[in-house]
Every structure is written in structure tokens, then in C-alpha cells.
Amino acid sequence: MGCVLIALGLFLLPYIDTNFAESESRDIKRLFTYVCIIGFSLTTFFALFLFTKITQPMQQLIQAANAIRKGNYGTRLSLVTSDEIGELANTFNHMAAQLEDNIRNLNHEKEHLASVLRSMTDAVVTFDGEGKVILTNPPGEKIMQAWCDLDWAQDEEGQEVNNGDVSSRDVPEPLIPLFKLVMEHGGDQSSNVHVQQGVWSVQMTPLYADSVVRGAVAVLRDVTEEVRLEKMRRDFVANVSHEIRTPLSMMQGYSEALLDGMAASPEESEELIQVIHDESLRMGRLVKDLLDLARMEAGHTDMAMKEVDLVELLERVYRKFSVRSKEQDIRLHFECSQSTIMLQQADEDRLEQVFTNLLDNAFRHTPPDKNVIIAATLAGDHRSSLAKVSIKDEGAGIPTSDLPFIFERFYKADKARVRGESVGTGLGLAIVKNIVDAHHGIIHVNSTLGEGTEFILQFPVNSPK
């Protein structure tokens, strides 16, 4: 506007009479000054108008965008106009609302996934393409920590390879073969891995991004107990088959000899019949022990619980084995400082079976001119008294490697270390353990190879609650 007025003044200047130039020069200059001031004022006003209508809303839009970029998804613009700026503000607010809703849904999905992972009893570990751990659930974290502690090592420069940070851990050594198969060939891979004394079932699945394998997810389950039970089942079937096959074979062979008339005299026939009878008794004992053990492990054992004098019971067992000790030239001793040790709740017949079984094992593994000692003591106060019974021999002993397995079914000592020809079924100690457990007792063994074995039993004197 000011420029227009100035141009108009310059255009009319030649038409002014020169005679009036001098007299009107001051007026013209004044007019020119007024025109410039008015033009500058109009220009400034127009600039302020543009700043208010365009620049300031754009500044607010920029600030709102920066706020959303920083995570403040609830930011909104309060511009209410009908022009393009107002339409842009409405579009921005709609976009921010959609973005906030999407972020909220993603957070809900993430929390849901995290809850599912936390509630899983199986371990879940996620690896990226380089083998770095990027996500674990609590069981997976425990496994990774344990396995990384096992594989803790130093590199060639003496620096620690692992600093304990989850994101810096690599694939553990047992999982490397599966991880390589998944990354190279894709598809699900599964295997059982052995770590120390444990067995783990591992299922590893690839993670895809645009049809490219970018990592793997491993699900680990501890199947140590399942593998142990399966091995016990196989061993049980094999041992039962072996134990029953031996007497059956002998019974079949000797009965065929009788049928074929191979016995030349009545004495030989009687001898063959006696062998058949002994083997049938042996097989009967095996079946009876198996049935008793099965009932005990199923919790269906009938216990005639009553008050039992433990000292009187041990004296009776001692007298029963005294004759056998003289026959085998073994010195049998009974030591007890108390006159009576009363067990309030105990099955006398079952306890006698326990002590008889342990003494029978002691006599079969002890050479002549050695000692077998039965000892009984009472420990504790009147509220928590414990009856302690020890059966100790000076026999061949049990190897340290065999001690953890002696209470399993069909465990047998090396037959080369057993005196005589009488060999048990291997179920005796398993039955002993179940009877002691049924009385809320504890049994453990100390043994030194070549020096002897001691079985220590503890029973609560008072009625267990």
C-alpha cells in the first residue's frame, strides 16, 4: 500500500507548477513522509496478520509433533478454523488418536504375551540371527544363567567372555547344533540335550522376517524324571524277565529230564523234583515281593499300627539269627543301653521284615570270623524322640558309585562278592525303603569297599502328626 502511494506521488510530481514548487515543497515532503509512515504501518499490520493466521499455528503443529515423537501420544491441537490450517489440525488430531490407540493395543498385546510367557512352566528363550539372547521368560532366564555359569570361561587375552547380561549372552553350547540347523535349513528342530545330570527336551522354531530367518525360539522342558522313569521301566521289564526266566528254564529242563526218563534211580528223581520245587518257591518269592512292592508304592499297604517295643523286637530277631551266625562262623552282637524303646505307631511284622532283610544281606556279604552288630539307641527329648537302629557288618562293602541306587528295584551286589549260592531278587532293599517311609522313618547307608556296610534307621517314637 505504501509503495503504491509513493509511486502515485512520483507520477504527479512533474505536473505540479514549478512556481509553486518552493512554496509547496514542505507540504510535499510532509505528504511523502505521511505516505511512507502509513505504508510501513500497513505492511507491519499485514505481517502480524500472516504470523497470527499461518506461522503461529504451524509452530503449534511442530511442537505437537515433537511431543508425540517423545512419547506423549495424548497431545492434541486446539485450533478451530475453517481454512486449510484448521483442516490440517483436525487431520493431525485424528492421526494422533489413531496412533495412541495403536500404541495402546500394542502395549496390551505385549503385556498379554509377557503374562503368557511368565505363566509358562517351560523355559522359552529367543535368539537373534547372531545367536544373542533377546528375550526369555523366568524359567528360561534361570536355565540360561545356570548354563552360562557352567560355560564361564576366559578368552585368549584373559578377558571374561560373559558378563552376565542377558542381551550379551550367546547360544549355550548344548543348543548350538540345533540353532545352526534352524538358521541354515529352517523348519522346526527338536532334540534331547544332556547337561550334567539333567536331560532337556528342546523344540526350536525359526523366526521369519519377509521370508528370511532372522532368529529362533527355543522351548526347553526338563524331562530328567521322565527319562529316569522310562529307564527304570525298561530295566524293570528286563530284570523281571531275567529273574523269572532263570527258574522257569531250570523247571522246564528238569521236568523234561523226568519225562524223558533220564533219572536212573528214585534218588535222582527225588533230586530233580527237589530242584523244581526250590525254583518254584524262588519264583513265588519273586512274585510275592513284586506284588508287595507294587502295593507299597501305590499306597495300598495295610499296616497294623500299634504300640511296639523296639528292643524286644530286635532281641527276637537277634535270637533268630544267632543260630545262623554259629553255622557261618560269624560273630553277631546286640547292643542297647535302654531296656525298652516304645514306638507308639508301628507294624511289628513289617519292622521285623525290615531287620530280617538287612541282617540277611549282612550275613550273605560277610566272610567268616567277622562281626555283625545290631545297635539301638534313643535320642532327643520326650516330645521329639527318635529311635535309632544300626545294623553294621564287616563284609565286602558297597562301591561308592552304587550307593545312590541300592534302594532301587532289582539292585544287586556283585555276585562275586556274595557268599554262598543264595542270591536275592534285588527287591529287598526297595521293600525296606518303602516300609521305613510308611513308618515316617529315615534310612541311609554308610559303606566302605572292603571294610563293611552300616545301615542306619531312625523312627519317630511318638505318633507322627
Image (cartoon, helix red, strand yellow):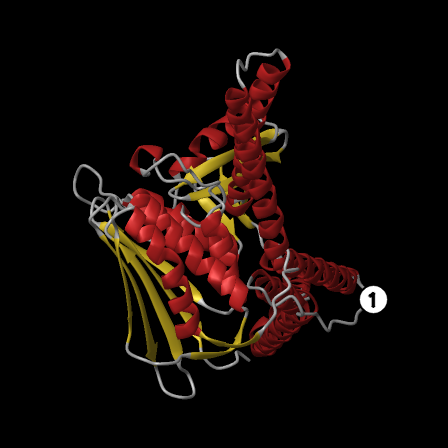
Amino acid type, label 1 = Ser
Left or right of 220, for residue 119: right
Residue 16 quadrant: bottom right
Q: Position of residue 140 (x, y in %)?
A: 50, 51
Q: Position of residue 208 (x, y in %)?
A: 61, 34
Dot 1: element: loop
Q: Give the crowd class for mark 1: few <14, some 14-19, many >=20 residues within 10 Å.
A: few
Residue 207 quadrant: top right
In the picture as drawn, the residue positioned furthest to the front comes out as 266
In the picture as drawn, the residue positioned furthest to the right comes out as 82
Q: Position of residue 345 (x, y in %)?
A: 54, 76
Above or below: residue 331 compared with residue 202: below
Do we see residue 168 in this rendering? no
Q: Residue at x 78, y 64 (%)?
A: 90
Nearer to us in this view, 66 or 369: 369
Do we see residue 256 in this rendering? yes
Nearer to us in this view, 69 or 406: 406
Residue 380 quadrant: bottom left
Residue of label 1: 82
